[in-house]
Amino acid sequence: MVALVIAEHDNASLKGSTHHTVTAAVQCGGEVHVLVAGANCGAAAAAAAQIAGVAKVLVADAAHFADGLAENVAEQALALAGAYSHILAPATAYGKNILPRVAAKLDVAQISEITKVDAPDTFERPIYAGNAIAYVQSSDKIKVITVRSTGFDAAASTGGSATTENVTAVADSGKSSFVGRELAKSDRPELTAAKIIVSGGRGMGSGDNFKILEPLADRLGAAMGASRAAVDAGFVPNDWQVGQTGKIVAPTLYIAVGISGAIQHLAGMKDSKTIVAINKDPEAPIFSVADYGIVGDLFEVVPQLVKELG
Amino acid sequence: MKVLVPIKRVVDYNVKVRVKSDGSGVDIANVKMSMNPFDEIALEEAMRLKEAGKVTEVVAISCGVSQCQETLRTGMAIGADRGILVETTVELEPLAVAKLLKALADKEQPQLIILGKQAIDDDSNQTGQMLAALLGWPQATFASKVVLEDGKVTVTREVDGGLETLALSLPAIVTTDLRLNEPRYVTLPNIMKAKKKQLDVVKPEDLGVDVTPRLKTLKVVEPAKRSAGIKVPDVATLVAKLRNEAKVI
């Protein structure tokens, strides 16, 4: 048994989601290889070779891999797939985009967003916004899996000594092309990698009012998130969204401000170590999952909290 | 130009499902069913392209039990010109749905297929990408903006950390994210009109597709419950608890 992990990277460095996926791959029981498909991606490949538990790094370096187009990366994985028992990718926008193409062409089912490996052929995955956990067994010859980062610790980024092998790059599909990218510039940590998250909901009232959360996030070195209600209301960008249809997070501390706690939101954050809720409605469902709750007006409580933290 | 929009009948967004006590699955008897919200967004986008004169026909497709006809009628009330149901009582996995849709796409020859990015029941997020691969078409998933012109489709996608724009040659697959549009409400006159629209029913066998499930669900359980904590009287107590009890700051 050998597992292949499709690395998520920006050519210069690996995304943290890759390390969590390696841990899931190791738990599948065999050797772990990592595919880095990119353009001038030597630095990302070198980082992959350092990850503890990785035996081999396969590098496909070509201009048409620069922007991670699904058509091209999936085709590259397919060219290598025959040698593997498991093919895994992070359950991020990157991995979700690519991996179902691989599964379909291999004529196997994909098992999405696993949170646990019970056996090399049996996995746990949440369904219905995390309201149920399904134990799923696959009899396909190759198991194709996306991995939810919060279910697995990150593999150590040092200590590995994988061999690196260049593989022949597949041809450009020619059917899609990259036009541009607008990434939000922020000095804050990325939502899915942050140790502390300060999140706002509909109770914030407006996009401007989110500014009240900034001093708190600054003081704690926290990422900022939001509920779907706040995103739908246009207060903040969609990539802040935590929940079933947004990002799944599990920080050490999650501070929910003016969030009522719809099941779809809880699905995205209930695995956080400590949850704090600030809400003026004492009956809000968020209090049923919060370790510490304060019933009060967020516009008074949040500034007090910043002051108290000093 | 013809557009296909696959729509799925799912447990309504507002229903909190319960796990059956024997662990065989979730109890969906007698719960409210609706069109998957992301599919509603897909259909709305197809209608807007039609209203802008860029598309001539919108065909809604559903796969599943005969009650999916209701979902298709809703789709036609939103504005789809006709509907196709692939009827089966087999529990369909995304790969099977992708194969059924491929067979219909081969027949219907659309230039664009717009799907929801995921269904809110199994949360798989696979069908659109699988269909693109089976057809050998390009894809743009998680769309927040779709521009159709000059024989190509330019799509802005919601990715981690921001937005990304791709240009795809046609025919192509687009899957929708939340902010693409706000679906219209269905009006009574349109519901009446939808009853007269064409709805064809076919079987997987007619399309030559084997829909046998590949995965076995061994059991379905409730997630570990998180117990409610305490309410603290003031901010000073909160900070003290976070420092000394939870030790997270």
Image (cartoon, coloured by chain):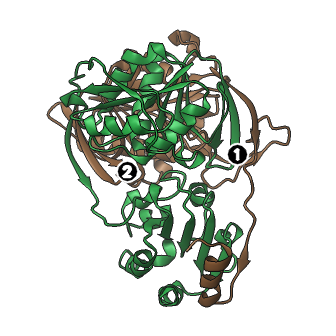
Chain colours: A green, B brown
Query: Residue drawn at (36%, 43%), measured in percent from left and top?
Result: A14
Q: Secondary structure at mark 2?
A: loop
Q: Amino acid at mark 1?
A: Ala
Query: Which residue does the numbered mark 2 point to in the structure image?
Result: B160
Q: Give neighbour class at mark 2: few <14, some 14-19, many 20+ (Cα, 10 Å).
A: many
Query: Residue drawn at (24%, 53%), measured in percent from left and top?
Result: A182
- Percent across and percent down for residue A92 are 44, 44
Residue B171 visible in the shown view: no
Read off the chain for label 1.
A
Front-most of residues B26 and A276: A276
Q: Is residue B135 left or right of residue A5?
A: left
Q: Is residue A260 left or right of residue B18?
A: left
User: Which residue is the extreme one toward the right?
Assistant: B22
- Percent across and percent down for residue B179 are 38, 54
Establish if B208 lies above or below B158: above
Residue A190 visible in the shown view: yes
